Image (spheres, rainbow, N blue to C red):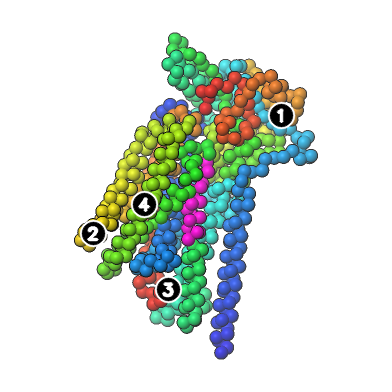
Amino acid sequence: MGTERKVNNRRKFFQTSAALVGGTLLYALIKPFEALAQPKEEEIKTDQANLALWGMGVDLEKCIGCGKCAEACKIENKVPKEPFYFRTWVEQYTVKNDGTVKIESPNGGIGGLKQSVPDEEIFKSFMVPKLCNHCTKAPCVQACPVGATYISPDGVVLVDETYCIGCSYCIQACPYGARFMNPITKVADKCTFCYHRISEGLQPACVEVCPTDARIFGDLRDKESDLVKFLQVNPTQVLKPHLNTHSRVFYNALSSEVK
Amino acid sequence: MEEHYKHLYEALSQVDGYIYPNEIDLHWGLMIVLYPYITGLVAGAFILASLERVFNVKVLKPTYGLALLTALSFLLVATLPLVSHLRHPLRAYEILMTPNPTSAMAIFGFVYLWYLMVVLLLEIWFDYRLDFVLWSKKSTGFKKFFYRTITLGINDTDKKSAKLDDKLGYFITLIGIPSAFLLHGYVGFIFGSIKANPWWSTVLMPVIFLFSAMVSGIALVMVIYMVVSWFRKVEIDMPCLDTIAKYLFYILIIDFTLESLDQIHRIYEAEESFDIIKVLVSGKLNITLLIMQVLLGTIIPLIVIGIFQVYKPDEKIRKFSYFFVGILVLIGIFFMRWNVVIGGQLFSKSLSGFTSFKAVYSGLEGYVMAAVWLIVPLLILTFLLWLMPPWKKVTTHE
């Protein structure tokens, strides 16, 4: 009698524990789905209203493809020198008379881009600086499994180097090829708008060195800023608008060939 | 590091067209090919086991236990290639500690644990509990210790307790089916939800992953069943084998239809990305996609098993063909994963050019390591079959 009761109790205990563990796991399983939609867009809260919302304008009519921006970025941010790692780079587009498009960006444009197509074959040519678009609905932020990449309150997409596990999912998720795996730190790396500089009231390195002022950096909330004025007077466009990432890098004179 | 740079310079010289400069370094290699492959085998093997238990396909009984143990062996290894590919593997636990709720990848840890802890381990435990009790009385040494420990002190051998085991086991299998669907459909979602990549971004991806998982898992259990019977020197149960092959045939048809639908849809819609995908399929992927995946992995198996549905040749021929077809299907699904994972990274998101993939032999991402991750589950399975052979079970569920 006694033994039987004991055994039954044990069994009951086991069943209850199994139910508890199962329930907890089930809850843990369902919980993360709560917010499976897009990451919440940052709404302007009262305490954030005074913060800047950083963005950049790129005036393609002014870019001469000298590559100084890409070079300055590498120096400023200690990006490895090898030609596989760029926080910003410059592409040279050449539309030929036969309608084909040649795109080049040897070493990201560092050292200056040179035309490789003979003059008589060229219909038109232009330069396009690229960088992280600091998307409002950033696919990389959505994808990061641990939340190591995030949007700062002032609108800059950043990576927490001490937290990134190096899975590369964000790199896969970025439609612009703006991220890379840093071979030294072994974490995802990208443009930060030189966050260490802009926090001190300075301009990002690429903007600082641009000899033709083709890059305009500023606060999208400040109606007096150069950036807002640039957006006001120029018909600007973002890259890959169909992906609905709500990018904060705006291009003037963007041609349809640009991908 | 130098080796890596050398490798990248070589890739740089082979770039075709224009790719973004950061795209020369391919981020997901063989390990990420293995990850959906192995989880797929798990999900497929489990579904085969459920066919017998829940859908009452009694003829599959000889493979029930084998399928469950196969699923467990592969599931135990499933996360290892994933973790080993991380640049900071020691931080992997952060996925469980602070998962980002919007990340498709973050949920994997939970789906995995749910599946391992709640579904597979519990189901196997309920299936074996009474046997553990009985075996513990007869065996000695490590086996005795293991059996006694694993019963968790629940040593009832009466009919009532056996019935309860059976009932709970059945209930868990019932939960297990949607869980297996979740496990692998979800792996498909990791790829299918990447809108930046037109080769991955299709709503069909989770469904395709699910059906290809079933195909590969069923093929795996079929092959393992034949090999195990051969080792045990017992007759293969032909009705059982024929039935497995029949299911393989039907599910392979669904899988092939879905994948074809996906491609036809791409061709017909011919969106912006179509031009580059056309070149990808006919160029860089022609061998792995058209030959390995479609011809060897799908069409030949379909023809062979298809013929057997109307005309049944001699047992010997059938056995040989099933074995051959099973291996072909397993190779085909491996290349299906390859075509998704590697194929999706071969073309630039600028849609203007291609990079190349060169796998290495050594290192954590190399062929040798990949072979290890495929052999380890088989060793685990061998151990499990020695420890808890399904054919020596005293009790079987109703």
The residue lying toward the viewer, choosing from B156 and B273, is B273
Residue type, label 3: His
Asked if residue A117 shows in the view, the reply is no
The CA span between labels 1 and 4 is 54 Å
Q: Which of marks 4 and 2 is nearer the N terminus?
A: 4
Q: Residue at position x 57%, y 69% from top?
A: A18
Q: Main secondary structure of the magenta part?
A: helix
**Residue B221 in the image, given as x and y percentages of width and height:** 36, 60
Residue type, label 2: Lys
The residue at which mark 3 appears reads as: B397
The residue at which mark 1 appears reads as: A220
Camera-near label (2 vs 3) is 2
Camera-near label (3 vs 4) is 4
Marks 3, 1 in one chain: no
Disc number placed over residue B312 in the picture, else none = 2
Residue type, label 4: Leu
Q: Earlier in the sequence, mark 3 or mark 4?
A: 4
Q: Residue at position x 25%, y 60% from top?
A: B319
Are circles 2 and 1 on residues that touch, CB within 8 Å? no
Q: Chain letter of disc 3?
A: B
- Work out which residue is located at the far bottom of the displayed protein and give it: A1
The residue at which mark 4 appears reads as: B252
Callout 1: 10 Å neighbours few (<14), some, many (20+)? many
| Magenta highlight range | B177-194
Callout 2: 10 Å neighbours few (<14), some, many (20+)? few
The CA span between labels 2 and 1 is 74 Å
